[in-house]
Image (cartoon, rainbow, N blue to C red):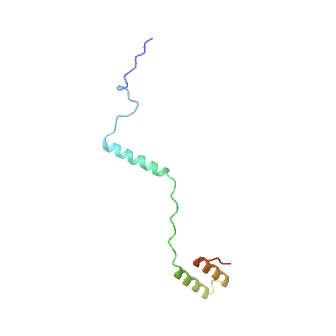
Amino acid sequence: MLFLYRPPQTYMPYRLPRNRMEQAEYNRQLQARFNASRRASSPPTPEPVDPVAALRELGALHNEGMLSDEEFAAAKAKVIGTDAS
């Protein structure tokens, strides 16, 4: 039995090529879908804290009685970067 197949040029299982504007819009949509599927970036790093201003604020809180001596020492050690113990 003889089967006649169409030549590959006459059958296209996909749409004909798009014009430039349609292709650009398709590329934008494809990029947007790709960007939506990407993992969230890492959180931004916090801005550096001015240690002098932080110590002044802690001193003011301590003088007003809002911080106990132990809390003030622990917060000051944290700002300076030394161990509180």
- In the rendered structure, the answer to whether residue 72 lies left or right of residue 52 reads right
* Residue at point 61%, 85% (across, down): 62
Furthest residue in direction left, as rendered: 20
**Residue 80 placed where, x, y %?**
58, 79
* Residue at point 51%, 73% (across, down): 48
Rendered-image quadrant of the C terminus? bottom right
**Residue 77 placed where, x, y %?**
62, 79
Furthest residue in direction top, as rendered: 1
Residue 67: image quadrant is bottom right
* Residue at point 56%, 82% (across, down): 55
The vertical placement of 83 against 34, above or below, is: below
- In the rendered structure, the answer to whether residue 60 lies left or right of residue 29 reads right
Residue 5: image quadrant is top left
The vertical placement of 48 against 69, above or below, is: above
Q: How many marks?
A: 0
**Residue 19 placed where, x, y %?**
31, 40
Q: Foreground residue, 52 or 22?
A: 52
**Residue 17 placed where, x, y %?**
34, 36
Rendered-image quadrant of the N terminus? top left
Furthest residue in direction front, as rendered: 82
The vertical placement of 45 against 61, above or below, is: above
Q: Foreground residue, 51 or 40?
A: 51
The vertical placement of 73 against 30, above or below, is: below
